[in-house]
Image (cartoon, rainbow, N blue to C red):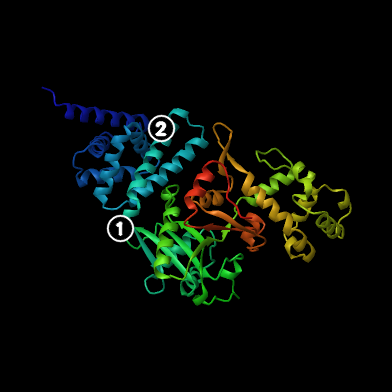
Amino acid sequence: MVNTHLSGFGEMRKKIADSISHTLHTFATTSRRDVDQALSFLASDKTNPPESMRAILDFYKKGGAEREAFFTMLAALDPRKTDYVFNQIFAAMDTPVWLIQLRADLSALIKKLGAAGEKAGRLDSLKELLRTFSDYFSRIFNFQYLVTRCCNTQNTSIALLKFISEKEGVHPTEHWWNFENRLDSSDHIILSLEHFKMPYVPLVYIEVALSNGLIRKMSRILGDKRRPPDLRRADTAIFYSVNTTFAGLEGIALGAKMIIRAREHIQTNYPGIRHFATLSPIPRFRGYLTAVLAGGAHNFSLTGQKIDTNKKGRFISAGEIRDIKEELSKKEKGIETLSISSMLRKALGDEQWHANPVLRRSMEHPMKELTRYYFTREKRIDPKTHARTTHAYDPVANFHLSNGASIESINYLANPSERGMRESYGMMANYRYEAGHQERNKLAYASGKVIAEI
């Protein structure tokens, strides 16, 4: 009688060997035999001896074609077998670190092959493998395996402080020691999530400022001349920066888990805090508005013609148009004949427009109205169908709205730093998280509605 398990194991080894041979023609015979056997064990429910794992690591570390061969092998397997591979790696290493790196490398490979015009069949199989990775990560990085840590000057080493500061992508500092000031401030909290198999390695972290009411400007959180609030009167926690620390962990909702854990931690340790909100950037707004005002081809709902029509003074008042044109006319002739969109484009074309008192005052209302339109009307376009989706075009807005937040406030020149002006002309937004409304808001957003109190 034929042992069907051994027969299937042999077929699996042949499939793996064929995948390697197809991708890596120059692979040495002796090395191929070792890795062939090691990968076969990895994709089965057999015990994976340490030498098999070492052979696979040595093979993978060679880079280039070897890595492509490894991912081609994984993509060729049934998704159920892929779980064996991931579990074997996790068990052999007793940590998900290499799995995180594998997912990052796979994402980079897909982008590389896509840019090079790789055939759809192979690219689709690799994308399916990436989805399998995401499903697996959603299980091993679930709440039950994540530990919340409050980072402070007592428990944060210099090495960890450097690591956190280097991963800060929302409000980066020039030097890591400047980041230490955020740990030393009594009204600031930095919380992180760690996997129980990766202690003292933050997977995601959030920066929080405690205040009495909403904070609408970054200078009140990180400004050199800011005045810390009286914590006895603090009733609001402001989330102002959420950062994932590994590329291989992007897109698995760690940020959403971090906000939930942060809320739990603050409610337990700061009972006076009753409200939770954010002060968030609007990273795509400047690029969006520049494209709209330029009048070229784009997929946005707003056009220069809509702005010029300005039905019922929707975007700008007659007085604001008059004041802006009068101010621009001091430096250039022919301004009076410009359309509204051309006038706004001209005003914003000066990088220091906000330093001009007249423009600073007169541009507030139109910039807020244009931002409001951006939040409530502009949606992502499906790359396959080219149809408009229900998701907000802005990635930060999409993140918070899909987690049940509502837009509480649009803030003019809230971040006039070089980065803030480059990303959004200094515009920022407050999103509010109210426990009793989040599920309702999620359902509304899924149907295409943006909950906004603006």
Q: Secondary structure at mark 2?
A: helix
Q: Closest to the observer: 268 or 422?
A: 268
Residue 279: x and y in percent read 56, 61
Residue pictured at 50% horizontal, 48% vertical: 440
Q: Amino acid at mark 1?
A: Phe
Residue pictured at 52% horizontal, 75% vertical: 233
Q: Quadrant of the C terminus?
A: bottom right
Q: Earlier in the sequence, mark 1 or mark 2?
A: 2
Any mark on residue 48, and which?
A: none
Kindly check if marks 1 and 2 are in contact, taking CB atoms under 8 A apart as contact: no
247 with respect to 66 (left or right)? right
- The crowd level at tag 2 (other Cα within 10 Å; few <14, some 14-19, many 20+) is some
Q: Secondary structure at mark 1?
A: loop
The single residue placed furthest to the top in the displayed view is: 1
Q: CA distance from mark 1 to mark 2?
A: 32 Å
Residue 98: x and y in percent read 33, 49
Residue 234: x and y in percent read 51, 72
410 with respect to 179 (left or right)? right
Disc tally is: 2
Residue 86: x and y in percent read 30, 43
- Tag 2 residue: 125
- Tag 1 residue: 196
Q: Is residue 108 visible?
A: yes
Residue pictured at 59% horizontal, 45% vertical: 393
Above or below, comparing residue 212 to residue 304 in the picture: below
45 with respect to 209 (left or right)? left
Q: Amino acid at mark 2?
A: Ser
Q: Is residue 27 visible?
A: no
Q: Closest to the observer: 295 or 172?
A: 295
Would you identify the image quadrant in which residue 226 lies? bottom right
